[in-house]
Amino acid sequence: MSSYVVKKTPGDTAWFRHDRFGMFIHFGLYSLPARWEWMQSYEFTKKEDYQKYFDNFNPDLFDAKEWARQAKAAGMKYAVLTTKHHEGFCLFDSKYTDFKSTNTPFGRDIVREFVDAFRAEGIRIGLYYSLLDWNHDDYPIDRVHPRRTDEDAEQQDKGRDMTKYAQYMRDQVTELLTNYGKIDILWLDFSYTRPDFEKKFHKPWMQFDGLRGKEQWESDKLIALIRSLQPNIIINNRADVKQDLWTPEQFQPTEWVHDSDDNELVPWEACHTFSGSWGYFRDEMTWKSDKMLIDMLVNTVALGGNLIMNVGPTGRGYFDYRAENALKAYADWMKYNSRSIYGCTMAEPEFKAPEGTKITQSEDGKRLYIHLQTYPFGKIAMDGLHGKVAYAQFLHDASVIEFKESYTVMDNGVNKEMTDKTFFSLPTVAPKMISPVIEVFLK
Ligand code: GLC
């Protein structure tokens, strides 16, 4: 058994830590301007100018079954959909707003179709819900609000009642957690008590009345409500209250994420995009290579974490060809190598990854996976394995990999025996596989 002790949290993270790999989906009105889901904020877009995206929202090629099929093929075991992003537009038929997909020309409850289709494929269901809301009249003009630079911004902010908005969030979260069956993850985003931001802007984020943080979101109340409706659900930490999930965003940790208060290892999930933006961004040129995508998944699991990779569907509701290609890269790799991901975690400390490799180990401790991210010539030597290897093979084709516990090298004309490592012999020609994996059966 793995010797790493993971922090006990209120929700059930056992399935999550086993499954390791999920799909994020950012879909909303911002898919139409197609230049980042924050576009409304970056461009200070007025409500009346944003309205055209609502009036023209009609993703006629949306097919939740097709999304689910691609997620499953890519090896993703759970999926998280933006039910409402910062723009405030709801993909579900909420009683509490008119700003929802059922009121657009499209007229459908997208959350419902997502939940049904993904569940049918055996994929666990996660819902993203934004704490920020640039459409709600009681949401304050904070430091990222599209109206923040208006001359009369302070005036506009007057009378906005955050307690009403907090109630609105609870009402909508209640809808989401009662009308769609069992929900496995609620992904809140995000409360901004962030010292780094405050330093940068010299002011709390809710600029005019100085409000900030979990008190205003009434996070404790929100979380208590969520737990009462779905007790075992996984909740992330972005409501400013520590729950089940730490979520490093768009960067790769270099060690197992830990709770800075007590240093315990925590359940964590790196969230990443294929190209930089979360919402569909037509002209973005920074798409990651297939190899980078695969290596990011491996690097994450090698540090005991999960990876959630994002797709931003187009305004017509399908995954564009670049996203499809990226998912295909995962599908091709996971078909043969998923055993080194599911049920795997950081390898025991006695096993040191040889240069150019990453290692993962099954939770039961029985198998070790050496991911050859840089393919070496001839052989690879590893510490800590002496007397422990029963058998080794390439994972993708089960072709045997011979190994020795000593190795003789010719050093300056003198034979030198090396006995401190385990040596795996490799074919000179690398298998046609991104970062091929050696599967080591431990005694
Ligand atoms: C953020 C962004 C956002 C994105 C999210 C995903 O904090 O505001 O647009 O949805 O992270 O992690």
Image (cartoon, rainbow, N blue to C red):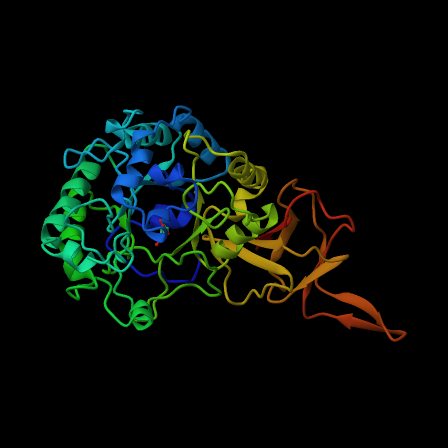
Percent position (x, y) of residue 184? 29, 42
Percent position (x, y) of residue 317? 41, 30
* Count of all numbered marks drawn on residues in the image: 0
Residue sitting at 28 percent across and 36 percent down? 51
Q: Image check: 137 left or right of 391?
A: left
Above or below, 412 against 211 in this view is: below
Q: Quadrant of the N terminus?
A: bottom left
Above or below, 319 against 6 in this view is: above
Mark yes or no: residue 36 visible: yes
Mark yes or no: residue 28 visible: no
Q: Quadrant of the C terminus?
A: bottom right
Above or below, 170 against 102 in this view is: below
Query: Which of the pair 278/207 is nearer the observer?
Result: 207
Q: Image check: 286 left or right of 69?
A: right
Residue sitting at 29 percent across and 70 percent down? 198
Query: Which of the pair 118/55 is nearer the observer?
Result: 55
Quarter holding residue 142: bottom left
Percent position (x, y) of residue 111? 29, 33
Residue sitting at 12 percent across and 53 percent down? 160
Which residue is situated farthest in the front direction here? 151
Q: Image check: 88 left or right of 402?
A: left
Percent position (x, y) of residue 295? 56, 52
Which residue is situated farthest in the right direction here? 413
